[in-house]
Each structure stands twice: as C-alpha cells, then as structure tokens.
Image (cartoon, rainbow, N blue to C red):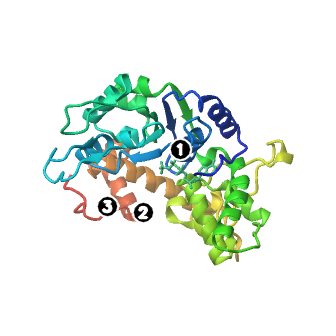
Amino acid sequence: MGPPIIGVSENIRKIRELVEHVAHTGFNTVIFGESGVGKEVIAQNLYMKSPRMGKPFVKINCAALPEGLLESELFGYERGAFTGAEQKRKGKFQLAHGGVLLLDEIGDMSLVLQAKLLHVLQTGEFAPLGSEKDIKTDTWVIAATNHDLKQEIMEGKFREDLYYRLNIIKIVIAPLRERPEDIPPLIDYYLQEFALQLGSINVQKLDPHVVDRLMRYHWPGNVRELQNVLKRMLVLGDADKIVDELFEAPENLQQTAPPVPSPESNGADPAPPVRGRNPISELLEMDNKDLIANGAFSLKEAKKKAVDKVEREIITYVLAKTDWNRSKAAKILKVSYKTLLNKITELSINPPSGNGGYPLD
Ligand SMILES: Nc1ncnc2c1ncn2[C@@H]1O[C@H](COP(=O)(O)OP(=O)(O)OP(=O)(O)O)[C@@H](O)[C@H]1O
C-alpha cells in the first residue's frame, strides 16, 4: 500500500491528526488539492488505519472515462445489457464491497452519474446496467478533486445534495509551494526509497544549498514533480544543473516561490536570491552574470528596458482585449492613434501568429 504521510507543516500535521480520528468512522470524505499534492496518499492512509484494512481498496478516475463507460465501470453490467456486453461484469462498487472506493476527480462526473451516485449513497443499493435487481453495497466512499466544488455547484455542474452527502469530512491539502518545510523530509524519504529501488546501498544526501533552492521553487506538479526531480538527480547526478533547468524552464521564469525564512532569521532577513535569476534580472531579461559584466549595466539603460517591458505588456494586453483594434486600444490607453502606432513599431508588438495581422481599424 502507499507511503506514510510525510511532512512537518501545520497543514500536514493537522491532516495526519484528522486521518487518525476519521479512519474508524467510515464517514464520507472529500479530499481537495491540486494534482500531485497527495490526495491518494491520504485516502490510502485513511484506509490503512480503518477497520476496512485488508478488504479491497479500489480507485477509479472519473475524469478519464466517458460517461457511459464510467457508469458501467462503477455499477457493472449484465450480459447483453448493451451491444458488446458479452459477459456479465462486476462494477467497482461491487469490487470495493466491505472496503474503500476512491472516486478520483469527482468534479468531472456528469450530472446523470452524480444522481446515480447519490442514490447509492442514500440507499446503499444499486442495480448493474441491464439488471432489475438491486445489490447491496457496504463501501466507504472517499472522493478526491482538484476542482472548487462550491463554485461548480453555483455553475450548475455539481449537485448540492451530493456535495453535502459526500462532504461529511473535508480534507484540504495545501500545494507544496505553500508548505516548503515539507520538502526536506520528503526529499529524505524519497531519496531513500528511490535508491532502494535502484538497488543502490549508499543513500545520497543532497547538498544543503540544493535543498534550499528546491524549497524556493513553486512546484506546479507538487510532490509528484519533486519525485521526478529526485529520480533525475539520482540517475544523472549534477543536482545543481537539474535545479538550474527547473528554474530556467520558460514557464517557470516568473514564478519563483516567495523566499522561505530560515529558522535562525526569525523571518526578518530576506532569503538570498536564486542563482541565475532574481527579480531584477527577470525584469530586465538578463542573467545575473550579464547584469554586472563589463559595464553592460547602467541605471539609464535599466530604466529604459524596464519601461519598455511594462509598456509592451500593457499595450499587448489592451490590444488583445480589443481584438487587436488599434483605434479602440488607443482610446483606452488615452494616447493618440499615431503614438500607439509608433509604440507598436518601436516595441515590435504583433498579434499572435495565425491571427492574420491587425484588422483594418
Ligand atoms: N505527504 C506525502 N507523503 C508521502 N508521499 C507523498 C505525499 N504527498 C504526495 N506523495 C507522493 O507523491 C505522489 C503523488 O501523490 P498522489 O498520487 O497521492 O497525488 P494526487 O493528489 O492524488 O494526484 P492526482 O490528483 O494527480 O491524482 C505519490 O507517489 C505519493 O505517494
């Protein structure tokens, strides 16, 4: 079964406590959190600490299957229930009987299936497709989602009655970037795990400055992404280069996580900037080393670059909002049409390719 719940943050400590309290109750539970944040681990730990341990733990991803297939996977079917149903087949509710059914990505379930699920939760019974007879099920349903279900209810995409049925216990896992203190223990745990998997006896430790940099990264893929980085480090070595690449990936340039105060600093000292890029080099689109090399940097030059960058961003934003209509954009920006044309040329602002250039305006 899955790993223990690793982490020292307030968020993870509270969740560990909650798991201890909830596991024996079998109350329906919804686990909220971004992808890769550990929703399945929490569900597995709930199961492992419950009296249902040893009975089946069944998982189904509601986002991965089209409605018809998801329905037959959940409830099963009789022979001849639909074209192609040559054999009777048990559904996940039957397979999970006595144990746990994890409904992953519940926010993606269609309204029709939501109604069926609600019925099972209310009555403890369901009928496989093509069957007249109801089957009893004693299944602990744990749902997971990275959607805001309250918002989905407002938009008419998720049933409110189902939400309240499922959501007796609510567990919210914070993204990894909001709990960087969990990164060192996760690193220790997974380096050991992966070293074992690779058959190596010597478990490597990461250099503290590498750990420090990893704590500043914003981890869009959360713990799953951290695992992948650690695997790369074990196989390829050169941890520093791997972290450089992490920060230099184009989608990550603007998104360094806020500095993490070190325990000694009482939060008062700003953390040192990440090597390679910092907010100034970001703004000026230069690497740190170029910034201070051979007189390439002057306040005047820096100011011009920064102003150009801001102007380019604002003008592009307004043009995109006006469907690239320059006279409308000039009015919004309160500059003359001619000034805007000059800026567009000077700053090389073009509509996205495939947009067919500027419309006649
Ligand atoms: N707190 C944690 N302790 C130990 N391992 C963790 C923790 N959080 C996540 N992991 C590990 O990270 C990986 C991704 O976690 P998991 O599959 O539980 O995420 P998820 O939120 O269910 O993702 P998705 O929404 O994409 O299905 C797994 O291998 C899991 O074991």
Q: Does the residue labelled 2 lie within 8 Å of ligand 1?
A: no
Residue tagged 3: 352
Could you say which quadrant of the image residue 161 lies in?
top left
Residue tagged 1: 39
Q: Where in the figure is residue 183, as x and y percent of width and height?
A: 69, 53
| For residue 210, above or below residue 25 | below
Residue 283 versus residue 206: which sits nearer the camera? 206
How many marks the image carries: the answer is 3
Q: Which of marks 1 and 3 is in front?
A: 1
Q: Is residue 208 visible?
A: yes
Residue 14 versus residue 303: which sits nearer the camera? 14
Question: What is the three-letter code of the residue carrying label 1?
Answer: Lys
Residue tagged 2: 347
Residue 229 versus residue 285: which sits nearer the camera? 229
Left or right, 234 with reference to 272 = left
Residue density around tag 1, few if under 14, some if 14–19, many if 20 or more, within 10 Å: many
- Of the image marks 1 and 2, the number of the one nearer the N terminus: 1
Q: Which of marks 2 and 3 is in front?
A: 3
Q: Is mark 1 within 8 Å of ligand 1?
A: yes
